[in-house]
Image (spheres, rainbow, N blue to C red):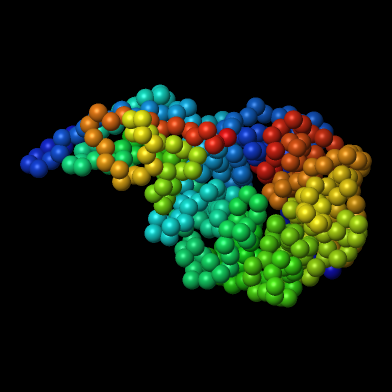
Amino acid sequence: MGARASTPRSAPPRRTRLLVATRKGLWALTSDASRRSWKLSSPSLLGHIVHHAVVDPRDGKTMLVAARTGHLGPTVFRSLDHGRTFKEAQRPPAFEPSSGRVVDHTFWLTPGHASQPGVWYAGTSPQGLFRSTDAGATWAGVEGFNAHPRRKDWCGGDQDGTPDGPKLHSVLVDPRDPDHLYIGMSSGGVFESADAGANWQPLNQGVAALFLPQPDPEFGHDPHCVRLSANPDRLYQQNHCGIYRLDRPATRWQRIGAAMPKSVGDIGLPMVAHPHDPDTAWVFPMDGTDVWPRVSPGGKPATYRTRDGGATWKRQADGLPKSQAWWTVKRQAMTADRFPTAGVYFGTTSGEIWGSRDEGRTWRSLARHLPEIYALEIA
Amino acid sequence: MAASGPGAVAPVVFRVAIPSQLFSYTGTRSVTVEVAASAPRLADIFAALDRRYPGIGFRIIDEAGHVRPHMQVFVGHRVERDLTARIVAGDEVMIVGALSGG
């Protein structure tokens, strides 16, 4: 495979801090320099449904949190003091009133390009794309997508969404070009814009959509998680129908999940790209057979790692429960730090955080008894 | 802001009961808002509430102008989800988190 790494290595981090977004609030889990000792914070925004929490890598300080509660409408909270205090966005993501559409929740947050401080993107359920130019204080719709005449065709109806609502996720900004964006939609597929969101093109060739009648549809797919690798010309995708890789400028995805063990399959929710090596990535498979149990296959959780761009996969389960572990990992709940030997982390639907300081070779439990974990991000 | 000048409508004060879910905005379970409209409607209450406590309106009312599914609004003892409903001086508005939330 041998994709070229184009992202320069920055100074190694001194410790790892994970933001833990859960169904009942936000926590931070912080390591020491060796990543052997971890400390869990007290909760912030306790009782809020936190879909995503992200710290701006451009200033290392601004934290945005996409939240709602069981009763109240969706909003975005901002913190400038590492989560000690929060202020609500003055204008959270919301559709134009004339559209008749309503944001159920903001699902995904992405800091903008390094050359555009203060710019952030948000993806919502149902599928909507929003942009802030003031570090999350106010948000406006990216109307090139939200008002696109084909948006409804691309996204389908409510029945085409995931169990907790159709969503726009995986907002990716090309580190070489602030105008070059990718989004993923469940459902809808992967789309690309070369002009900062003014226009969009589907990018789904080669991706299976077994729930649609057409053999190779242009859109309507269900990417669960799309990631840029250390080489921004290489994308990885964990889809409802398999694991894929795309090397640009090609436009046809390759099903690299075909090399996964047949007894495990290549269905899952998250996918993580190695921070420095574009040939390395991890997935966390789940059971997608018959009625879609969405648990670890056979109750035996494991990550699978490729070091050759998906040609081969290695099972990594040392330290994880050997049986009777019926949880899984949601699409935002797996991540990697930027140490030279990357740490890999995932949070489970049963509220446990597992970590590996050796790229998945060995695992240990870092925190337990949390609410259902929705997202893990390196802060 | 009190109305003034010829043709101006004298503001009417309404009491609004606030549920615990929204104390972070108001700090209290009962607030008053002033509405200056010749034929005030429930929407005017929420507009006044949002002016006084910025952001509170969107947590209760969505961008299409509907009361959110897990919020409930009473005017007096009457459930009222129609924001165009008329209100009159003396009406008490109660906002509650519906039992369906959680």
**Residue A131 rendering spot, x and y as whole percentages:** 50, 55
Q: Nearer the viewer, residue A60 or A29?
A: A29
Q: Position of residue A71 (x, y in %)?
A: 51, 37
Instruction: Indicate left or right for B25 with A58 as reference.
Output: left
Among the 4 quarters of the image, the one containing residue A21: top right
Q: Residue at x 58, y 65 (%)?
A: A156
Residue B54 or residue A96, whichever sits in front: A96
Q: Quadrant of residue A209?
A: bottom right
Residue sitting at x 15%, y 35%: B10
The reply to whether residue A115 is visible in this rendering is: no
Q: Quadrant of residue A53?
A: top right
Quadrant occupied by the C terminus of chain B: top right
Judge left or right: residue A114 versus residue B18. right
The residue positioned 39% from the left and 42% from the top of the image is B81
Task: Looking at this view, name the residue that lies furthest to the front.
Answer: B78
* Quadrant holding the N terminus of chain B: top left
